[in-house]
Every structure is written in C-alpha cells, then in structure tokens.
Image (cartoon, helix red, strand yellow):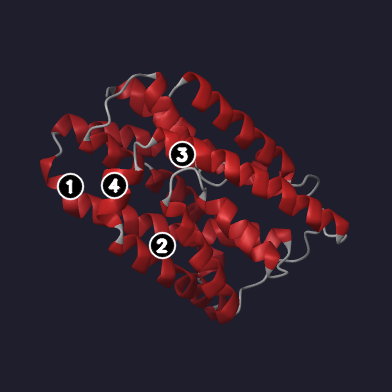
Amino acid sequence: MNIFHSIVFGAVEGITEFLPISSTAHLEIVQNIMRIPSTDFVKSFEIVIQLGAIFAVLALYIKKIFSSWQYFRSVAVAFIPTGIIGFVLYKIIKNIFLGNLPLAALMLILGGIFIIIFEKRQARRGKYLETGETRALTVREALAVGTAQALAVVPGVSRSAAVIIAGRSLGLSRATIVEFSFLLAIPTMLAASVYDLYKSGSVFSGADWKMLAVGFIVSFLVALFSVRWLLRYIKKHSFSAFGWYRIALGVIVLLFFI
C-alpha cells in the first residue's frame, strides 16, 4: 500500500460505512481493483480505518449521546451481543472472512434481495417513508438490534443494513433506527479497532502508521458529509435503491473479479 491507496480507502470507507451497502465489501473490491495483496496489515487497515468514520459520528452526536441516560444505556446494551460475538470470532473474522471476495459478493446479493422484499412489505403496510421523531431504544429493542448487528461480522452483510432492518421490524421509525445505527457504530468500531491494534499494532512500521493516519483523516472528513446526506435521503426515499445497487455490484464482482 501507499499514501494514494490510503486516500482512496479512506474515501470509500467514509462514504459506505453508514449506508446499507457494506463498507467492508467495498474496501475489498477496491483492494482487488488496485491489486493490493491481502496482507495482515491490509486486513488491519480495513478494520482500523473505520475509526475515522466513527469520529465523524462522535463530532456530530456526542452531545446527544450524553444528553440522557436512556441514549447511553441503549447504545451500551446493544453493543453487548456484538462485542461478545466479535471477540469470540476475532480470528475467524480476520483470517477467513476478511479478504473473502466471493463471500462478500454473495452477501451483497442476498442482502440486496432481502432489503427490496422488506421495503415492499413496509410499503404495503403504509410505512414506506415513515420517519417520525427520534427516541432512545428500550433494553429489549437494543438487545435485538445489537444481536442483528453481529451478523455484520460476515463481509457484505452490512452493519447498518442489519441494524436498520432489525429496528424497522421492531416498529421503530426510520429516523430513530438510522440515527441509532450511527450511535451504535461508535462502541462497535472503536472496540474492533482498538483490539486489532492491540493484537497487531506492534509490528506496524512508521510508514504503516502514516498510511493509517492519512486514511483516518480522509474517512473522517468524507463521513461527515455521508451522514448528513443519508439523514436527508431517508426523508423522501426508501432503502430499495440500495438493495438494487447491492445486487448489481454483487453480480459484477462475481462475473469480473472472481
């Protein structure tokens, strides 16, 4: 990898982290296009680069997180199942899941189909563009959403897609669950990044840390715009377009990159 690769990876991460299209799958596709070998550092880079996007959420929502005990509690409770599963499956995630482009492509397609079917069902129920006011989740809702998020350890599933669909299935408004997907990303990605740095950071060179820093900054800046854009988008659109995009991208990957 070089600095240019770091900038591209940072931009892709910042754009895709909070959209229901799987940032991990997009990073692996970019890695394949650029013919970057799937080394241990590259795998760590894909994990740690998410910190930039997470800090963008912190910058936008830190006051809200600490504004009430309910918000803080719901995020903490939702993180529990994800944290446990991520810790237990860490070696499998890094050694088997990451870099598995066929798996990511398959999950993109299956997830896209699921999103389209789900949105059609929501439309029939008259909840196509329901937004409503945001609120904190109950303990039961938080546990259910956090468990669904754990599915995103498989590349291509998409953490935000799992959280949003789980929340909508529980009857949460679109605005509430999209915002919560932002907030839940903070402990989830922070824990994943810190743990990976603890396990692998000691072997990084000075050049490696420089590339991580560049990717972090780019991801942070791009994510600031991505989050604001998504909040505006959901007011007038469903998530079906993301489903079709996932299917198209997954098919292209299977046909041309594998």
Q: Earlier in the sequence, mark 4 or mark 1?
A: 4
State the residue at coordinates (35%, 24%): 5
Question: In what element is the residue under mark 4?
Answer: helix
C-alpha gap between disc 4 and disc 1: 11 Å
Q: Earlier in the sequence, mark 4 or mark 2?
A: 4
Q: Residues within 10 Å of mark 1 (few under 14, many from 20)?
A: few
State the residue at coordinates (34%, 36%): 99
Question: In what element is the residue under mark 1?
Answer: helix
Question: In what element is the residue under mark 2?
Answer: helix
Where is residue 138 shown, x and y percent of the image? 60, 79
Q: Which residue is mark 2?
A: 187
- Asked if the residues shown at circle 3 and circle 1 are in contact, with their CB atoms under 8 angstroms apart, the answer is no
Count of residue discs = 4
Which amino acid is tagged 2? Pro
Q: Which mark is residue 200?
A: 1
Left or right of 222 in this view: 126: right
Where is residue 216 shown, x and y percent of the image? 37, 39
State the residue at coordinates (52%, 74%): 143
Position above or below: 165 against 226: below
Q: Earlier in the sequence, mark 3 or mark 1?
A: 3
C-alpha gap between disc 1 and disc 2: 20 Å
Q: Which residue is mark 4?
A: 94
Where is residue 56 shown, x and y percent of the image? 48, 48
Q: Which residue is mark 3?
A: 104
Q: Earlier in the sequence, mark 1 or mark 2?
A: 2
Residue 29 visible within the image: yes
Q: Residues within 10 Å of mark 2 (few under 14, many from 20)?
A: some
Residue 20 visible within the image: no
